Amino acid sequence: MPMYCFTCDADQPHRPLTRAEEAWLKERLGRASVREFWMCEAELNTETKKQCRNLRTGMNKKPFARPIRVPVPD
Ligand SMILES: [Zn+2]
């Protein structure tokens, strides 16, 4: 779903979090629910396929003072 990404400073594809990513974010934020978050899927490097993975909510393009990027699973 295309949405504005604050760290990319452009509209980028976003997707909801996977269950593993949700679990990580709940732990990170100390919250019971993180359903409102979307992750930026913009590819920052075409060779390594590294993604932006910055978080936003549907309503808020900058929900954190410092950006939170979802770590890539091992
Ligand atoms: Zn982004």
Image (cartoon, rainbow, N blue to C red):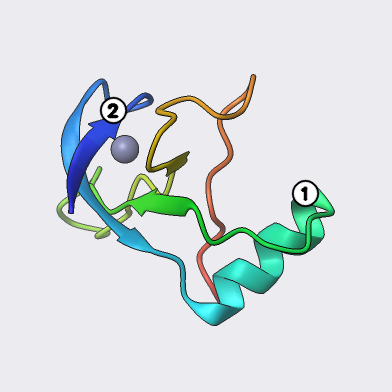
Quadrant in which the C terminus appears: bottom right
Q: Amino acid at mark 2?
A: Cys
Q: Is residue 1 visible?
A: yes
Q: Would residue 74 be seen by someone viewing this image from the given angle?
A: no
Q: Position of residue 24 (x, y in %)?
A: 69, 66
Residue 67 position in % (x across, y down):
56, 30
Q: Residue at x 68, y 62 (%)?
A: 33
Which residue has dot 2 on it? 8
For label 1, count other residues whose C-alpha is less than 10 Å away and answer few (under 14), some (14-19) or many (20+).
Answer: few
Q: Answer yes or no: disc 1 within 8 Å of ligand 1.
A: no
Classify 4 as above or below 40: above
Task: State which quarter of the image contains the N terminus.
Answer: bottom left
Give the crowd class for mark 2: few <14, some 14-19, many >=20 residues within 10 Å: few
Q: Which residue is mark 1?
A: 29
* 3D distance between C-alphas at marks 1 and 2: 23 Å
Name which residue lies at 44% across and 29% down.
60
Give the residue at x 62% y 27%: 64
Q: Position of residue 13 (x, y in %)?
A: 18, 50
29 on left or right of 68: right
Where residue 32 sits in the image (x, y, percent)?
Answer: 77, 63
Callout 2: CB less than 8 Å from ligand 1: yes
Taking 27 as reference, is 54 above or below it? above
Q: Under tag 1, what secondary structure?
A: helix
Q: Classify mark 2: helix, strand or loop.
A: loop
Q: Earlier in the sequence, mark 1 or mark 2?
A: 2
